[in-house]
Image (cartoon, rainbow, N blue to C red):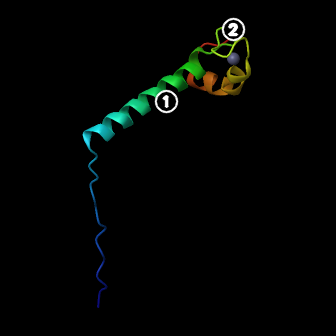
Amino acid sequence: MTTPVAEPRQHSVTLPLTARRVALGLTALLSLALLYFIGVDQGATSLFGSDTHIHEFVHDARHFIGFPCH
Ligand SMILES: [Zn+2]
């Protein structure tokens, strides 16, 4: 006697076009912010003045990704 195996249910989620646009916009904004903080923020050109805290915080990620640093 074999036990019937339940098939996993698969659902597709459809988002309205407005929700997709908002999700795309937020993803692009977050990506650009991450790109700025990891790749551009150098302390002297920082949006937050001559503070190097953000640069030092993402310093290892900067080297790991391969951005030129020092
Ligand atoms: Zn470095």
Question: How much space separates mark 1 and mark 2, taking CA atoms?
Answer: 22 Å
Residue 45 in the image: state x and y as whole percent: 64, 9
**Residue under the image location 57 percent in, 18 percent down:** 39
Mark 1 Cβ and ligand 1 under 8 Å apart: no
* Rendered location of residue 29, percent (x, y): 46, 27
**Residue 37 in picture, x, y percent from top left:** 59, 22
Q: Which quadrant of the frame does ligand 1 lie within?
A: top right
Assign a secondary structure to mark 2.
loop
Question: Residue shown at 73%/17% (left/top)?
Answer: 52
Choose the circle earlier in sequence order: 1 or 2: 1
| Quadrant of the image containing the N terminus | bottom left
What quarter of the picture does the C terminus occupy? top right
Say which amino acid is labelled 1.
Answer: Leu
The image quadrant of residue 16 is top left
Instruction: Name the one closer to the observer, 62 or 30.
Output: 30
Question: Where is 16 relative to 6, above or below?
Answer: above
Q: Which residue is mark 2?
A: 44
Could you classify mark 1 by the number of other residues whose Cα lies within 10 Å: few (under 14), some (14-19), or many (20 or more)?
Answer: few
Residue at image coords 58%, 14%: 40
Q: Which residue is mark 1?
A: 30
Q: Give the class, few, some or many, for how many residues have Cα within 10 Å of label 2's Cα (few <14, many ≥20).
A: few
Callouts 1 and 2 close, C-beta under 8 Å: no
Q: Amino acid at mark 2?
A: Ala
Please name whichever residue, 33 or 66, is drawn nearer the observer in this view of the structure. 33
Q: Going by the image, does 63 lie left or right of 30?
A: right
